[in-house]
Image (cartoon, rainbow, N blue to C red):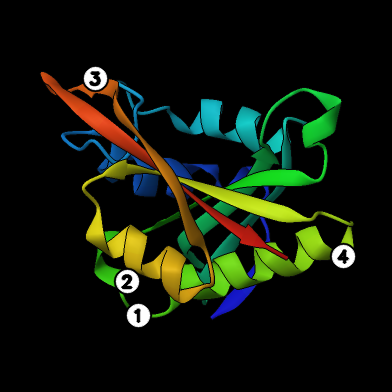
C-alpha cells in the first residue's frame, strides 16, 4: 500500500468510497453523495490542508483529509481530520496508515492538535481514534438529524 497526495484522477474512486458513508448511513451528515466532479473540486480546494489517498497498486482504497477546525485565528494550530476506507478494506490498517501520515504532515507544518468528529454510535471509529492517541473531548447530544433520527456527535482530540 502506498500513500500519496490525492489528485483529480482519484476523484471517481473517492466519490465511490464516500458514497457508502453517505447513502443509508449516519457516518456522514451529507444527504446526497457528491459526484466525482464535486470530489475533484474538493480535492483542489484550499479549504483542506491536506488530502491524501491510500493505493493498492493503482486502486484507491481509502482517503483522508484535514481541514481547519474553526475559521478564527486562535484555532489556526488545530486541524480536523477525516478518513474513509472502502468497505472491503476496513479493519486492515488502511485508516491507521492514512491518519498516521496525516498527523506527520500536520506536525511538520506546526499544527498542535487534531480533532476527530464522530457520529455516534460508531464503535469502530471510536476505537481507531483512541488507538491512535485521541482522547474523548465530549459529546453534543442530538446535534445531527439524519435518517429520521437524532444523532449524537462526539469529539476526540489528539495533541501532535
Residue carrying label 1? 92
Residue ID at (34%, 60%): 126
Residue carrying label 3? 145
**First of labels 3, 4 by sequence position:** 4
Rate crowding at label 1 as few (under 14), some (14 to 19) or many (20 or more) other CA atoms within 10 Å.
few
Q: Left of 117 or right of it: where is 39?
A: right
Residue 141 in the image: above or below residue 93: above
Give coordinates of residue 116: x percent, y percent: 51, 49
How much space separates mark 1 and mark 4, taking CA atoms? Answer: 26 Å
The one nearer the camera, 20 or 80, is: 80
Quarter-of-image position of residue 99: bottom right
Q: Looking at the image, is mark 2 or mark 3 nearer the viewer?
A: 3
Residue carrying label 4? 108
**First of labels 1, 3 by sequence position:** 1
Q: Which residue lies furthest to the right in this view?
A: 109
Q: Looking at the image, is mark 1 or mark 3 nearer the viewer?
A: 3
Residue 58 appears in the rendering: no
How much space separates mark 2 and mark 1, taking CA atoms? Answer: 6 Å
Residue carrying label 2? 89
How much space separates mark 3 and mark 4, taking CA atoms? Answer: 37 Å
Disc 2 + disc 3, Cβ < 8 Å: no
Residue ID at (68%, 28%): 70
Numbered disc 2: secondary structure: helix
**First of labels 1, 4 by sequence position:** 1
Amino acid at each position: 500500500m502506498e500513500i500519496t497526495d490525492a489528485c483529480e484522477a482519484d476523484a471517481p474512486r473517492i466519490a465511490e468510497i464516500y458514497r457508502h458513508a453517505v447513502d443509508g448511513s449516519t457516518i456522514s451528515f451529507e444527504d446526497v453523495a457528491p459526484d466525482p466532479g464535486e470530489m475533484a473540486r474538493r480535492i483542489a480546494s484550499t479549504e483542506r490542508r491536506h488530502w491524501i489517498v491510500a493505493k493498492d497498486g493503482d486502486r484507491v482504497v481509502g482517503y483522508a483529509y484535514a481541514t481547519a477546525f474553526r475559521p478564527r485565528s486562535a484555532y489556526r494550530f488545530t486541524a480536523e481530520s477525516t478518513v474513509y476506507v472502502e468497505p472491503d478494506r476496513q479493519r486492515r490498517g488502511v485508516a491507521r496508515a492514512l491518519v498516521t501520515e496525516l498527523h506527520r504532515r500536520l506536525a511538520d507544518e506546526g499544527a498542535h492538535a487534531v480533532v476527530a468528529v464522530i457520529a455516534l454510535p460508531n464503535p469502530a471509529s471510536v476505537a481507531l481514534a483512541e488507538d491512535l492517541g485521541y482522547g474523548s473531548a465530549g459529546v453534543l447530544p442530538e446535534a445531527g438529524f439524519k435518517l429520521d433520527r437524532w444523532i449524537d456527535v462526539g469529539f476526540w482530540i489528539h495533541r501532535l
